[in-house]
Amino acid sequence: MGSVSKKPSFTPFSKKQMKVLCWWMPESPFSSYDAVICDGAVRSGKTLCMSVSFVAWAFSAFSDCSFALCGKTIASLRRNVVTVILPVLRELGFECNEKYSRNLIEISYGGAVNRFYLFGGKDEGSAALIQGMTLAGVLLDEVTLMPRSFVEQALARCSVEGSKLWFNCNPEHPMHWFHEEWIKKCDEKNCLYLHFTMKDNPSLTPSIIRRYERLYSGAFYERFVLGKWVAAQGCVYPMFSQAKHVVQPPDSFEKYYISCDYGTVNPSSFGLWGKNGGKWFRIKEYYFDSRTEGRQKTDSEHYASLRELADGLKIEAVIVDPSAASFIECIRRDGIFRVIPAKNDVIDGIRRVSDCLKDGSVLFSPECRASIREFGLYRWEENSAKDSVRKENDHAMDDIRYFVSTVLARDDGGGFFAVAAKRN
């Protein structure tokens, strides 16, 4: 018996979602606008209605033209936009032909065909990927996570008469360039600005909204739940509690990892992690501060301490600060441990560690005194024009962030962050 495919089901759109769907139509009072911005809380119904509207607008105005769908990475764009919108478009009568090797989707409807290219804007070099194209429109998903150079290059490609620009994002620091240059100047840029809250997504039940409210705290709560552009301040991890997070670890574990923040003049911090029953325990740690000790250690001496921390256990991999090239080479040369350079996006990593602390999936042995101390001292930089943390009391914090960002995502097949990343 063949499998039965489920058709997309919809809760009726909210008034704000309908405005996104219809703003470009000739009878709309906003049809003369050149752009639309949707910002606000996570799961507030922005992405689906914007994506459907973008494709519908493209076919209302153009045929045989090129458009761009942009995300921070191609993978996140496929997850957040493409895999959500294609079943909907097919149900509405569009034919969609994905060409994976070219990062292209050819869509046809009513005899018209348009090309939708996928781009990732993860760093300053990404601007070169889109340079030289001629576009009739661009949709930038999670625009605040992309470098300004990439965004401005994408906008510059929209030179076809009648082209329009589409942006959506969750709030970031209020001095973020996109907030300064687009949201605060939306009138002079002839841009429709729509702010979303979770109440604008009629598919969310009160219990689901309460769950999201419990997920975040501090600035992340104000941004992701309340949809506010606020500066992070105070303690980076206010949700950390010794009563909740400091426990005596169990006697046995399914697998082990070690995470390392390596320093010569600055402290070095290594943590041994074990998995038991779906939770990860920082079993013990190594912390060496050359200033306090009055001497520096060589790579070989730090590596000997790492061997001692491993204590003969089968270590799946050692996760190391990617900038510590000489120490990585020292570990590889000995041939005992597999080395993985850590994912090192600071703000994303802090969000992920926050999620783990909130749901209790990472816990700490009382022996991990350096980690426990730094949790109480780790602070956001005050009066900064962007989210940044003070470069002090952060070495155990860094190695914990490396572990969470690199191992937990890998160990759970990439699904660990679905609650934080899944968006409409």
Image: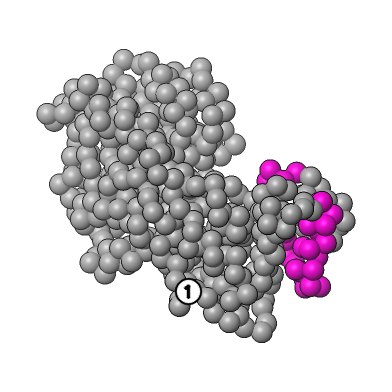
Which is nearer the eye, 139 or 297? 297
- What range is drawn magenta here? 298-325
Crowd around label 1: few <14 · some 14–19 · many ≥20 (10 Å):
some
Residue corresponding to mark 1? 242
User: Which residue of the protein is positioned furthest toward the bottom in this rendering?
Assistant: 251
Nearest the eye: 203 or 96: 203
Q: Where residue 414 appears, x then y in whole percent?
A: 55, 57
Q: Is residue 287 left or right of residue 35?
A: right
Residue 180 located left or right of residue 235: left
Q: Residue 403: x, y in percent? A: 61, 59
Q: Does residue 160 appear left or right of residue 2 in this picture?
A: left
Residue at x 35% of width, y 32% of height = 178
The percent position of residue 98, horizontal first and vertical second, equals 50, 39
Whether 31 is among the magenta residues is no
Residue at the spot x=26%, y=53% of the render? 226
Where residue 287 sits in the image (x, y, percent)? 68, 62
Q: Secondary structure at mark 1?
A: helix
Above or below: residue 360 compared with residue 82: below
> Can you see residue 220?
no
